[in-house]
Each structure stands twice: as structure tokens, then as C-alpha cells.
């Protein structure tokens, strides 16, 4: 944030200096409005920084919020499951599947889950204490939920190697690994992995590397074994299905009545709760940013008040040589609009950079460029700056030149 503020200040300084080099049009309003940005005693740089900070923070928060909400909810496929049922025991598998089919949910999927810890990579033991303080060390120390599947899951794409088709392998069981986990763990095709499943060791050889779309709200895994590799291992099942909002309560009640140990997770309700939390957090930050915008407006009004007598004198000179109120109003409008446009563009540019950096390196969400929000933010900044400026200098337009010039 400190770097962004320093960059904002440097950019504001550069804008004021570049204003001297902008071509001078024949329009008096344009020439004078532009000249007011860099003339001695101008507070343009201070105003640009004050307003730009508020614009930057408000837009950055909005962009980050929209990207988070898009990542967790708005980009979810239309046919994604709306319910997860967890802790289904092996002896409940058939009965639970029958319950879903009887209620018309023929699309339900029951997937086996085997909990494990990574114990060896390419024959070398994994000692958890060696990785606890290492960046991304949790890839070595975390608990992995394994599964075995015949078909590649939806939202997964093979990037290296091949998915198993037909019969099993003659050597170690084949394993498919997610690409980021493969990179962090140093795995490639042919690498071997060993997992500890409640004291029992199970090994496999990497046969494929997958790209996983984690945002599709389906059951996704870092490691998938070929069928038969995990037979006999202690496991539970997770079921997913899609239901209409009207069916949610009845299905949940039927599940609890028949299988008290099974937990039903309503994905729609979870996403709504997350969205509400994000909205509340962003509301607080927006309020703080709005105070920065208000401070910018106060700085602008103060800067105009400090140069009020100079502005009155200049305006009366122009009136004395034939300038109309309309010309003077246009001059002020050009100055305020240029200030607002510069502050808006600088703030929007820095907000985009901050939001992109936060998404890529902190939140790990996909970046969604939002030009409408940026253009709207710039437009509102221009309008607000012009409004505050006119409220501060409107009284100058109605003054008579002779009394003012006599006092001088």
C-alpha cells in the first residue's frame, strides 16, 4: 500500500508537469483551465493525491470483491451440484443411492474417500518437520483425501500422460496428480508416491498430470488412483446431487431421518453466506475509502479558498475585456474536470494493479477485468470534482468587475 501511495504521489507530480506540454487550443476556457493546474500556488498535486487515494481504495476493493464473488459463485456451472452429503459409510452406500434414485435424483454420484498422509516421494521418506516452515510446505504435511475412479472427473483435463483405459497395470498402481501439487512436490510421469493410510502403506506411480477447475463445485482431488488400488482401505463416501430450491428442505429431512450420521451441506446456502461476509467486510473498507474521498473534497475546497482572491481578480480582468459568465464557468469546469479525470484515471489504474496483485498472489483467484466499473469510477470522480469546485467558486461568476478592480 505504501508503494501504491508513493506511486500515486509521483504520478500526480508527473501529471502536473505534463500539463505544461499539452497543446494550447484556441479556446480561452481550455487554455486557462489547463494553466490553473500548474501556475504558482496551485494545489493540483495535493488534490490529485487526496482524491486519487479514495478512488484507488474504493475501486480496488470493488474489483477484488467482484473477482471473489465471481470465483466462488457466479462462474459456477449451471449444472453443478447443490448438495454434498458426507460421511456415508460403506454399508450405507447402496441404501443411500437408492434413496436418491427414489426421489428422482438419478444424476447423484457417490465417490469413495480415503484419508491419508504423504509418507514417501520417489522412495525418499517425507519427514513433516522438515517442511513445516517451508513455503508451500503444507503440500508435504497436509492430509490428502484419495479416491479411485474409472473416468476422469468433470472439470479435469489431462495435461501430461494418459488416463487409464480398461485393465489395470502390471506394476505399481497408476496415479493421476493435480498439476500444482505435482510442481510443488517435484513429481513427474513415472515418479512414485507412497501414502500412509492409518498405518498401512500404499504406493503408486504417476501416470498422468491433471489441470483441475476447482471452482466447479464438484468433488475434486489432488491424487486419484486407478480402480482396485485402494480396495480394503478404510473409506467413506461423499454424494453430490443437484436439486431445485423447492426440494432442498424435503431432501435434507429425508436424509437426516434415514441416515442420522450423514451431514448434508447446502452449497447454495454456503455461497450466500460467504457472499454476505465479503459484502460486509468490503462495506467497512468502502466507508473508510469514502472518508478519503471526502478528505479530497475538503482539500479541493480549501485549495480553491486559498486562491479565491486571485481567482476573483483574474475573473474580473476577463470580464473587463469581454469574457462572459459562460466563458468563466467553462474555464472553471475545464480545470475541475481535468483534476477529476486525472485523479480518476490514476486511481483506477493503481486500483487495477492492486486488485490484480491481490488476486494473483494473496487470494489466488482468477483475474476478471471489469472496464465498466473503472469507467464508472472515473466518471463519478469527474462529476464529483466538478460539483465540489463549482460549489466553492460559483459566487465569483456573479461579481461585478469595477468594484473589484478599484480595490486592487
Image: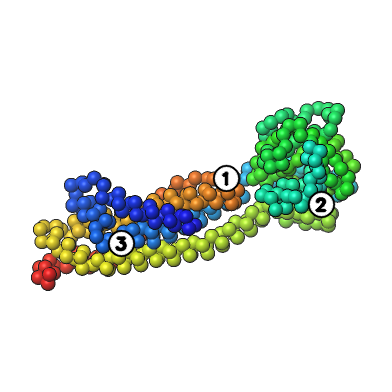
Q: Position of residue 55 (x, y in %)?
A: 43, 57
> Secondary structure beneath disc 1?
loop
> Secondary structure beneath disc 2?
strand
The mark found on residue 9 in the picture is none
Where the C terminus falls, by quadrant? bottom left
Q: Residue at x 64, y 45 (%)?
A: 215
Q: Residue at x 81, y 43 (%)?
A: 125
On the rendered structure, is 372 left or right of 384? right
Cα gap from disc 2 to disc 3, whole angstroms: 65 Å
Disc 2: which residue? 87
> Secondary structure beneath disc 3?
loop
On the rendered structure, is 130 left or right of 318? right
Q: Which comes before the other along the chain, label 2 or label 1?
A: 2
Q: Which comes before the other along the chain, label 1 or label 3?
A: 3
**Which residue sits furthest bottom?**
407
Q: Which comes before the other along the chain, label 2 or label 3?
A: 3
Q: Position of residue 406 (x, y in %)?
A: 9, 70
The mark found on residue 366 in the picture is 1
Q: Nearer the viewer, mark 2 or mark 1?
A: 1
How busy is the neighbourhood of tag 3: few (under 14 within 10 Å), some, or many (20 plus)? many
Cα gap from disc 2 to disc 1, whole angstroms: 31 Å
Disc 3: which residue? 43
Q: Residue at x 31, y 53 (%)?
A: 16
Q: Position of residue 213 (x, y in %)?
A: 65, 41
On the rendered structure, is 363 left or right of 303? right
Amino acid at each position: 500500500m505504501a508503494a501504491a501511495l508513493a506511486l500515486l504521489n509521483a504520478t500526480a507530480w508527473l501529471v502536473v508537469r505534463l500539463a505544461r506540454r499539452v497543446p494550447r487550443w484556441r479556446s480561452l476556457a481550455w487554455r486557462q483551465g489547463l494553466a490553473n493546474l500548474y501556475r504558482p500556488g496551485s494545489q493540483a498535486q495535493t488534490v490529485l493525491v487526496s482524491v486519487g487515494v479514495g478512488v484507488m481504495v474504493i475501486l480496488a476493493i470493488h474489483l477484488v470483491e467482484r473477482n471473489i464473488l465471481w470465483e466462488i459463485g457466479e462462474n459456477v456451472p449451471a449444472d453443478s451440484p447443490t448438495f454434498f452429503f458426507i460421511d456415508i459409510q460403506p454399508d450405507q452406500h447402496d441404501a443411500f443411492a437408492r434413496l436418491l434414485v427414489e426421489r428422482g435424483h438419478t444424476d447423484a454420484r457417490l465417490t469413495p474417500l480415503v484419508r491419508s498422509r504423504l509418507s514417501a516421494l520417489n522412495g525418499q521418506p517425507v519427514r513433516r518437520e522438515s517442511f513445516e516452515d517451508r513455503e508451500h510446505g503444507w503440500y508435504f504435511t497436509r492430509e490428502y483425501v484419495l479416491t479411485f475412479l474409472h473416468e476422469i472427473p468433470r472439470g479435469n483435463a489431462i495435461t501430461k500422460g494418459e488416463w487409464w483405459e480398461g485393465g489395470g497395470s502390471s506394476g505399481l498402481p497408476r496415479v493421476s496428480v493435480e498439476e500444482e501439487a505435482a510442481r510443488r512436490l517435484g513429481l513427474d510421469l513415472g515418479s512414485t508416491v507412497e501414502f500412509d493410510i492409518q498405518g498401512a502403506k500404499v504406493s503408486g506411480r504417476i501416470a498422468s498430470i491433471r489441470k483441475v477447475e476447482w471452482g466447479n463445485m464438484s468433488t475434486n482431488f489432488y491424487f486419484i488412483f486407478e480402480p482396485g488400488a485402494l480396495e480394503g482401505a478404510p473409506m467413506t463416501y461423499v454424494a453430490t446431487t443437484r436439486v431445485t430450491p423447492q426440494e432442498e428442505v424435503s431432501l435434507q429431512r429425508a436424509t437426516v431421518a434415514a441416515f442420522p450420521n450423514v451431514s448434508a451441506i447446502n452449497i447454495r446456502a454456503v455461497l450466500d453466506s460467504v457472499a454476505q461476509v465479503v459484502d460486509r467486510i468490503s462495506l467497512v473498507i468502502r466507508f473508510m475509502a469514502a472518508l478519503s474521498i471526502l478528505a479530497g473534497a475538503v482539500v479541493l475546497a480549501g485549495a480553491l479558498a486559498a486562491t479565491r482572491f486571485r481567482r476573483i481578480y483574474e475573473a474580473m480582468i476577463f470580464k473587463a475585456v469581454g469574457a462572459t459568465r459562460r466563458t468563466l464557468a467553462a474555464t472553471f469546469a475545464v480545470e475541475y474536470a481535468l483534476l477529476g479525470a486525472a485523479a480518476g484515471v490514476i486511481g483506477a489504474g493503481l486500483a487495477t494493479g492492486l486488485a490484480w496483485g491481490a488476486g494473483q498472489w494473496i487470494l489466488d483467484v482468477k483475474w476478471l477485468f471489469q472496464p465498466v466499473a473503472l469507467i464508472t469510477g472515473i466518471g463519478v470522480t469527474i462529476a464529483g470534482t466538478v460539483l465540489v469546485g463549482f460549489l466553492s467558486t460559483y459566487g465569483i461568476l456573479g461579481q461585478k468587475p469595477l468594484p473589484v478592480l478599484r480595490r486592487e
